[in-house]
Amino acid sequence: MVNIIWAGLIIIAIVYSLITGNFDVINNGILKHASSGVNLVLEMMPLIILWTGIMKIAEASGLLNSFSRLLNPILSKLFPSLDKDHKALGYMASNIAANMLGLGSAATPFGLKAMQELQKDNPKKDTATEAMITFLVLNTGGVTIIPTTVIALRIASGSRNPTEIIITSILATLASSISGLLLDYMIRRKNKR
């Protein structure tokens, strides 16, 4: 659906530029912004590669398993339908750890693995379970302690103090996580009645 929306917007822009005679503006914009997009990716890549590598080392060393055991009491309360040793909980903890470090790209594989494990237990394969919905809410509003990607973007844009957003990021993501989980809990309770 999003692809259709983007394609529609691009087509509308091209048609409008042809009608108004401003096609050179689109050509110049494409050339200018394509090169700045490539430069941005090249500037951010080292930081993302570094943190993805650190996450791989943490996974291989068992640090993520330790973190998972630390989060297990919290996760077992959030996911009462899952066994305490369910494989998905480990992937969820890894996903949460990566999201806390602001590494959405490193968190994605863990989130996908968690969903795959949850889908194995799903009796209705075409409908999300409560655990899947709760994990999606938690993942979407996930608490971010160090917004690594945003800091990298701010560095690439020449910010004088790229880390000044840490406190506001913690507060905003904490608020979104708590409100999302509360809403999820209330809807679950309402649906059980």
Image (spheres, grey):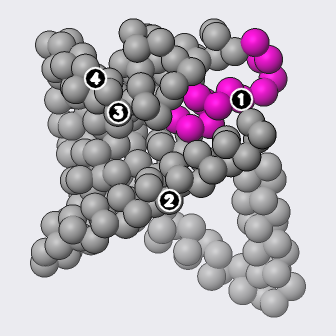
Image: magenta residue range: 123-135
The secondary element bearing badge 1 is classed as loop
Q: Is residue 137 magenta?
A: no
Three-letter code, disc 4: Ser
Return the disc, 3 or 4, that comes first in the chain's sequence.
4
Work out whether 155 lies above or below 96: below
Work out whether 179 lies above or below 189: below
Q: Which residue is farthest front?
A: 193
Return the disc, 1 or 2, that comes first in the chain's sequence.
1
Percent coordinates x, y for residue 58 in the rendering? 18, 22
Decide: marks 4, 1 in contact (CB < 8 A)? no
Depth check: 149 or 144 in front? 144
Residue at image position (37%, 66%) is: 172
Asked if one can make out residue 113 in the rendered structure from this viewpoint, the answer is: no
Depth check: 72 or 24 in front? 72
Q: Which residue is mark 4?
A: 68
Q: CA distance from mark 3 to mark 2?
A: 16 Å
Three-letter code, disc 1: Ala
Give the position of the C terminus as an image quadrant. top right
Circle 1 crowding by C-alpha within 10 Å: few under 14, some 14–19, many from 20: some
Q: Is residue 191 left or right of residue 167?
A: right
Percent coordinates x, y for residue 30 in the rendering? 57, 67
Q: Is residue 125 magenta?
A: yes
Number of numbered discs overlaid on the protein picture: 4
Q: Which residue is mark 2?
A: 179
Circle 2 crowding by C-alpha within 10 Å: few under 14, some 14–19, many from 20: some
Q: Is residue 190 left or right of residue 51?
A: right
Asked if one can make out residue 100 in the rendered structure from this viewpoint, the answer is: yes
Foreground mark, 1 or 2? 2
* Circle number at residue 74: 3
Q: Which residue is mark 1?
A: 128
Percent coordinates x, y for residue 137 in the rendering? 54, 45
